[in-house]
Image (cartoon, rainbow, N blue to C red):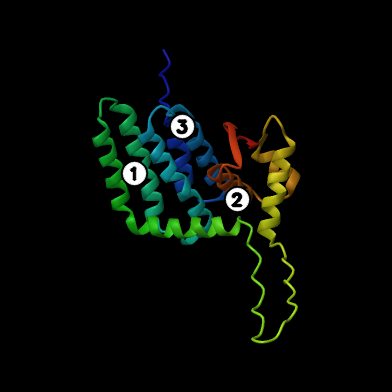
Amino acid sequence: MSRKQHMLEPLMASLLTLDWEISSQTIGKFEKELEVVREKVADDPYSKKLIDLALPICNYLRVRKGSADPASMQFLHQATRTLHSLRQKTKLGGAERKEKIKKLLNNFRDLMVDVQRINSSLDRATTTKSSPLPAKVAAGKKELVRKPAVRKTEKESSKEEVLKTIKRYKKGVDIATLIKITGVNDSTVRTIVYRGVKEGTIKRLRRGVYLAV
C-alpha cells in the first residue's frame, strides 16, 4: 500500500531545492508551492499568516540573491517547520498558535526589517509616481509655470502593460502567458501581480491564474 503524501511535502522539497540554489526558477517554484498550501489551509488564519510572512522573503531573495542574509533561508525553514507543527497538532489553541508565530518573528527581527525595506521599495517602484508641483510664483510677479512632462519609468510601463494584458483575459491568465505576451521578465511580472493582489486590483482566480478586478 502506498504511503499517503503529506500536504507540505512538495513545499518542503521545493525549499530544499531553493536552499541548494537561489535562482528565479527555484524562487518561483517555492512561491507556487506556497500558493498551493495557502488554498489548502484557507480555514486556518494562523497557517495563512505564516505563508504571508514567507512570501515577502521570496522577493527579498530575488533582490539580494548571492548577498542574501543566511537568516532568510533559516526563516523559511523555521516557518515551514512551524507550519508543519500547526497542521499536525490540530488541538493547539489560538493563543499557542499565535505565540509560535510571535517567537518566529522575534528570532528574525533584524531580517524582517530588511525584508520590509525591500518590499516597500518594490511597492514604490510599481506605483505610479505623482507629478511634481509647479514652482512657486515669484513674489509680486505673475508667471506662467509649465508642468514638467511626466516620463514613465520602465517599471511603471511594465506595470501598465501587465495590468492591461490581464484585463484582456476575462477568464484569467497565468504568469507564463503574461511573460510571453508582455516581454516583461519573470521576477518583475510576479512582483507586479503580488502587489496587485495586495492592492485589490488583481484577483487570484485559482493557483497561478489571475484576473483583473
Name the residue at 67% across, 40% down.
Answer: 176
Name the residue at 67% across, 32% down.
Answer: 172
Q: Position of residue 79 (x, y in %)?
A: 36, 42
**Frontmost residue, 3 versus 167:** 167
Q: Which of pointers 1 and 3 indicates the residue nearer the eye?
A: 3
Name the residue at 63% across, 62% down.
Answer: 130
Considering every residue shown, the one lying at the far top of the view is: 1
Name the residue at 44% across, 29% down.
Answer: 42
Packing grade of label 1 (10 A; few <14, some 14-19, many >=20) is some
| Left or right: 98 as drawn, with respect to 36 | left
Q: Position of residue 33 (x, y in %)?
A: 50, 35
Mark before the other along the chain sequence, 1 or 3? 3
- Placement of the C terminus among the 4 image quadrants: top right
Q: CA distance from mark 1 to mark 3?
A: 16 Å
| Left or right: 209 as drawn, with respect to 98 | right
Label 1 element class: helix
- Tag 3: residue type? Val
Mark before the other along the chain sequence, 2 or 1? 1
**Frontmost residue, 32 versus 202:** 202
Q: Which residue is mark 2?
A: 187
- Tag 1: residue type? Gln
Q: Which residue is mark 3?
A: 37
Packing grade of label 3 (10 A; few <14, some 14-19, many >=20) is many
Q: Position of residue 117 (x, y in %)?
A: 46, 60
Q: Position of residue 115 (x, y in %)?
A: 44, 56
**Frontmost residue, 6 versus 122:** 122
